[in-house]
Amino acid sequence: MAAVSGIHIDIRDKTYRTASHVHQAIAGLELHIGRNQFVCMVGPSGCGKTTLLNIIAGLDQQFQGRIGIDGAGQRLHIGYVFQNPRLLPWHTVRRNIELAFPGPPPTALIDELLDVMQLRTAQHHYPERLSLGMQRRVAIIRAFAVNPDLLLLDEPFVSLDAPTARQIRALLYALWRQRPHTVLFVTHDLREAIALADRLIFLSSEPMRVLADIPVDIPRDRRDSSSEIETFRQHLLSDYGIINSHL
Amino acid sequence: MIGNSDRHRPLYAILSLLLMLGLWQMLSLALHSPALPGPGRVATVFWQATRSGELPYHLTMTLRRLLISFAIAMPLGCGIGIWLGRNRNIDAFFDNWLVIFLNIPALVTIILCYVWFGLVEWAAILAVVINKLPNVIVTIREGARSLDKDLLEMAQSYRFGKRKTFVHVIWPQLHPFVMTATRSGLALIWKIILVVELLGRSNGMGYQLHLFFQLFDVASLLAYTFAFVAVIQLLELLILKPMDRKAQRWRR
């Protein structure tokens, strides 16, 4: 297992240039993510959160700044759950997960994850025959299974109905408790963020920067209670006017 | 009542073929001319030409040329098509070349190949390849341009590498385009190859048809034509259709 102590994100400037216009998406964003932290990023839609995740994942190299791992020069090993599931439609569920591994896939681990996500019976189906919720669960398994240094989740529950989203969120959380990872979770749902995170990072609209960086101190075993989460949320909204204007 | 279900498809096919044969027979009886022999006469000629080994020999020669030129043009066309489809600048640079080659009449390429390289086998193959190549390139380029960017990003973030990305992400998306290029390519090659043989070879279907034309031997002409059509149908049924089914099984 890769011993990554922390991840340092320093993006001084990210600007999109087209023939007709120029706009700055990120301006001076600096963050340090500690090992095995579950960090939720909350911001208005269209504020450049996906751009940020793509930069961290190394998909977008056109920016000023640097993404680094503390004390090491190696590239981050990343698991990425995109906003849409992005499964290969011509491969079965199981094959989609297996293909994420550079070497031989760990059969036992994949079996276990399929069980946790309740997909064992669907493992030989093709993605297009599954519901969107099931496809999203496959994408989460794929990202978890590769045992990444950093797990990126880009609004993975968007466009799901509330009960399905709640169910997958609980499964995701159970997985994370079982095998902790460093997680960057992007959402615009504050309740969801409070329920999951060690730390909340509020982002501004474009050009994006950090508005507030707040630890969530509700003990893990009391996160099930919606009253605790609601109290914390009310507290946040009254203490930080700047958040209120964005959510 | 006759239903419109798939169950009746083979029956319809047989009925429609029988109808065609019947019309042909009636027409040839009515005309009573050597220019249109009836199906029975053509079948006899077909049987004789097959037993003497003449028809199989010429058909094999043509099929051999078809396979060789196809085996050269398809991979080459796929390679160039993908390259152009993925590189906008190079594509813009070579686009004119493609348009020119697409519009040169097949006959001109064939004559030029024979004039430049002599009446030899590889000049004949080259002429067919040059005629076929631009079509493959244009079709595959279309596919390579429309590759799903989301899936390519997924492959990149999970570090698929070049080979794995090609086999599991790019090729399956190109498959329908490759099938289109194969089908239209076969149809095109069939037609060109006969002209190539007619002009500069001493065997093959094209050469034989030319001979029958000079002898006004319509029965042999038709017998060879049917052998030809039958081979194409077999290719479609035994190779292309199963390939399609296998590649499409994941579709909803």
Image (tube, coloured by chain):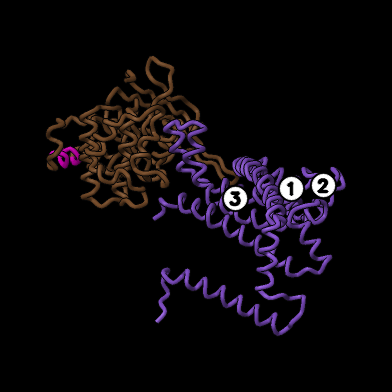
Chain colours: A brown, B purple
Task: Name the residue at 24% across, 31% down.
Answer: A176
Asked whether disc 1 touches disc 2, contact meaning CB atoms under 8 Å apart, the reply is yes
Instruction: Please state which amino acid type lies under the numbered disc 2.
Output: Cys
Tell which residue pokes out farthest to the bottom in this image: B30
Instruction: Please state which amino acid type lies under the numbered disc 1.
Output: Ile
Does residue A169 appear to the left or right of B99 in the view shown? left
Image quadrant in which you'd find residue A50: top left
Task: Name the residue at 64% across, 54% down.
Answer: B186
Q: Are marks 1 and 2 on the same chain?
A: yes
What residue is pinned by disc 2? B113
Image quadrant in which you'd find residue B32: bottom right
The spot of residue A115 in percent (x, y) is 22, 39
Span colored in magenta: A228-234
User: In the rendered structure, the residue with mark 1 lies on which chain?
Assistant: B
Q: Is residue A2 above or below residue A152?
A: above
Q: Are marks 2 and 3 on the same chain?
A: yes
What residue is pinned by disc 1? B130
Instruction: Please state which amino acid type lies under the numbered disc 3.
Output: Glu
Tell me how far mark 1 sits from mark 3, CA to CA: 20 Å
Specify the label residue B142 is tagged with. 3
Task: Name the residue at 36% across, 44% down.
Answer: A92
Based on the picture, tell me whether residue A232 belongs to the magenta stretch. Answer: yes
Asked whether disc 2 touches disc 3, contact meaning CB atoms under 8 Å apart, the reply is no
Based on the picture, tell me whether residue B205 belongs to the magenta stretch. Answer: no
Of the two numbered discs 1 and 2 on the same chain, state the one appearing first in sequence: 2
The spot of residue B167 in percent (x, y) is 50, 38
Depth check, front residue: B152 or A208: B152
Tell me how far mark 2 sits from mark 3, CA to CA: 29 Å
Depth check, front residue: B123 or B80: B123
